[in-house]
Amino acid sequence: MIRPIVLLACAAAALVAQGVPDLSGVWIVRGSANLPDDLPYRPEALKLWQARKANLSKDDPAAYCLPNGVVRVTSLPYKIVQTPQLLVLLSEGNTHSFRRFFLDGRAHNLDLEPNSWTGDSSGKWEGTTLVVDTIGFNDRSWLDDTGKPHSDQLHVIERYRRSDAGSLEVQYTLEDPKFLTRPYSFTRTFVPANREIQERFCTEQNHLVAK
Amino acid sequence: MKKIYLVAAFSLAAASLLLPQDDIKITGKVITPPGAAAPKGLPPAGPKGPVPHMPDGKPDLSGIWNGQRALPNQEPPVMLPWAEKLTAERTNNYSADDPEARCLPGGVPRAAPYHYQLVQTPKLLLMLFEGNIHSYRQIFLDRREHLKITEPLWYGDSIGSWSGEGEGTALVVDTVGFNDKFWFDMAGHPHTTQLHVIERYHRRDFGNLDIGVTIEDPGTYSKPWTIQRVSTLETEIEMSEYVCNENNSDVLHLVGK
């Protein structure tokens, strides 16, 4: 089990070593995992969201063990493993998968995966904030449990900051000219989960997935 | 995105299982796994160059590696009668009940034909799998004792420590705490929850990772089963996002006999 005090000590040591903040640790979202309900949707997108709510989320990709994508998070822990060149975000819940933030200065490359669930993420440090830019999405993931939609034009900018020793603040900015009338921002705060992430495979015991 | 061409390759392999000349027999203790014939030669070597090192002097295993490939001419496992019978049944039933084909984890030490990425820090070695499921395995380098496992796991509890000196330095990974659900390969070699896997990862040079696997499971094998494998460094292609549950066409074809 990782206790907050240990996290603090590790963070301090790594900050000295790399000259950048250490975001490592096992984190869990504080409060609701859902987005606020005031997204500036265009009428067509609003209609899609309302249809998903009206049919009781029956087509929720997560119910079929498909990935949550980037903006949608679960209330289960996430683990950040950080190296100078790469940051890995491990998810306990949903598909028990991972995202990679390339910190080596490479440009976006969508040749291999033009439209994927988690897109192509590159990060760079702006002072003590890690700014992660992601494009290359499909239009199948939901932005949260209520079914808020996005198009394949989605562009996500995440700003990761250790706002204080015991929390990780992430500000999300969503640009989606097809579905949103203007860029939209909201912030989540993650706090230490105080435990290691556990094995959890959606496909096991899920009757909606072919066995 | 699911790799259609790989699915196609497997479909071809699966189709070849159905050919009558692929005679499946129990030949002494040896099961001939259809579609998974022993390799006839060494895989092409990876790029040459010096082994990269971590700031603490340990070899750095980080990189995107091609799927682990077994070396030719290896000793087959020596199974207890129940395991030999079960493997033959699974093989004869065209691997229809393979959990891996249903998007469940491959477990340890099943080798997938997909890329995997190793991410190394002083305290942790991460294995990120492209497929079969796009998941991960953690190998803890900062503790010497296993956790008390109350619920058996697909990937078990893995702890790693460095062994040897200089160019011979290798990471020895010790894993216990497994469930008995996964198959070791397409032939269906089984195991019990007594399974103990020891893997030895030695980055021989820049582009070649030698992997020695020892499988100990007195409930299934009458002596430890050792396998030598190699992975080569992938320097051209990034890992893709392989989502097994998306358009999984395998299940429809896994009908058995």
Image: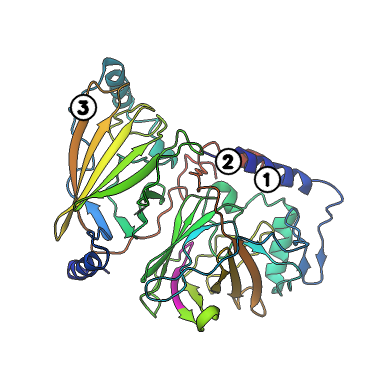
Image color mode: rainbow
Question: On the rendered structure, is A36 left or right of B34?
Answer: left
Q: Amino acid at mark 3?
A: Leu
Foreground pick, B11 / B241: B241
Question: On the rendered structure, is B3 left or right of A206?
Answer: right
Q: Earlier in the sequence, mark 1 or mark 2?
A: 2
Q: From the image, state whether disc 1 or disc 2 is nearer to you.
A: 2
Instruction: Please name the residue shown 72% across and 52% down the image.
Output: B93
Chain of the residue under the numbered disc 1 shown in the image: B
Instruction: Please name the residue shown 39% across and 28% down the image.
Output: A152
Q: Residue extending furthest right? A: B21
Instruction: Please name the residue shown 51% across and 81% down the image.
Output: B166
Q: Amino acid at mark 2?
A: Lys
Magenta part of the chain: B153-161
Residue B169 in the image, given as x and y percentages of width and height? 51, 79
Residue on which disc 2 sits = B3
